Each structure stands twice: as structure tokens, then as C-alpha cells.
Image (cartoon, rainbow, N blue to C red):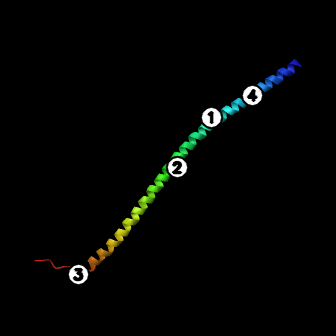
């Protein structure tokens, strides 16, 4: 009977050791996931900033195109009008 208790005790100790090893590896993964999540958050912030910059540049380009369209009409009008006589 003494041998059976030793086996039982040894089995319990092995089970505790295996469980402890498993839990310690989970903590490592938690740290890695936290690092990855931090990097993803940083990248998300950068992408959002880039998208806002692109939207702002797009709006500026549209305004510039509208101004060019207005100027083009005036240029065509001036090109189509008869030339002026120089003074003097």
C-alpha cells in the first residue's frame, strides 16, 4: 500500500508541475498578445492619420480644380476677344 501512495503522490506532483508549466506559457502569450495589440493600435492610429491627410489633400485638390475651371473660362474669353491697340 505504501507503493500506491508514493505513486499517487508522484502523480499529483507531476500534474501540478505540468499545470504550472502550462500556466507560465500562457502568461508569455499574454505578453506577446499585449505587444502585438499595442503595435496594431499604433498602426491603426497612423492609418487614420494618413486617411485624414489624404482626405484633406483631396479637398484641396478639388478646390484648386474649381479655381482652374474658373480661370480657364476667363482665359478663353480673353483669347477670343480682339486684340487691343497699343497706346501711343
Q: Are marks 1 and 4 in contact (CB under 8 Å)?
A: no
- Callout 3 environment at 10 Å: few (<14), some (14 to 19), or many (20+)? few
Instruction: Tell me, for residue 28, which label it has, or none.
Output: 1
What is the quadrant of residue 60 in the picture?
bottom left
Taking the spot 60% from the left edge, 37% from the top edge, the residue there is 31
- Give the CA distance from mark 2 to mark 3: 59 Å
Front residue of 72 and 56: 56
Q: Alpha carbon of mark 1 to alpha carbon of mark 4: how far?
A: 19 Å
Front-lying residue, 80 or 49: 49
| Sequence order check, earlier mark of 1 and 3 | 1
Q: Residue at x 38, y 67 (%)?
A: 65
Q: Which of the 4 image quarters holds residue 70?
A: bottom left
Q: Is there a contact, CB below 8 Å, between mark 4 and mark 2?
A: no
Q: Residue furthest bottom?
A: 82
Q: Are marks 1 and 3 in contact (CB under 8 Å)?
A: no
Q: Quadrant of the C terminus?
A: bottom left
Whichever of labels 2 and 3 marks the residue nearer the N terminus, that label is: 2
Percent from the top left, x then y, of residue 1?
A: 89, 19
Q: Tag 3's secondary structure? A: loop
Within the image, what quadrant is residue 5 found in?
Answer: top right
Residue assigned mark 3? 82
Residue at the top extreme, as displayed: 2
Q: Earlier in the sequence, mark 1 or mark 2?
A: 1
The residue pinned by badge 2 equals 44
Q: Position of residue 75 (x, y in %)?
A: 29, 74
Q: Residue at x 25, y 80 (%)?
A: 81
x and y percentages locating residue 9 in the rendered image: 81, 23
Q: Secondary structure at mark 4?
A: helix
Amino acid at each position: 500500500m505504501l507503493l500506491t501512495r508514493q505513486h499517487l503522490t508522484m502523480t499529483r506532483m507531476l500534474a501540478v508541475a505540468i499545470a504550472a508549466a502550462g500556466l507560465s506559457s500562457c502568461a508569455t502569450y499574454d505578453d506577446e498578445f499585449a505587444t502585438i495589440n499595442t503595435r496594431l493600435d499604433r498602426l491603426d492610429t497612423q492609418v487614420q492619420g494618413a486617411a485624414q491627410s489624404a482626405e484633406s489633400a483631396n479637398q484641396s485638390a478639388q478646390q484648386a480644380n474649381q479655381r482652374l475651371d474658373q480661370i480657364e473660362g476667363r482665359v478663353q474669353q480673353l483669347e477670343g476677344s480682339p486684340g487691343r491697340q497699343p497706346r501711343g
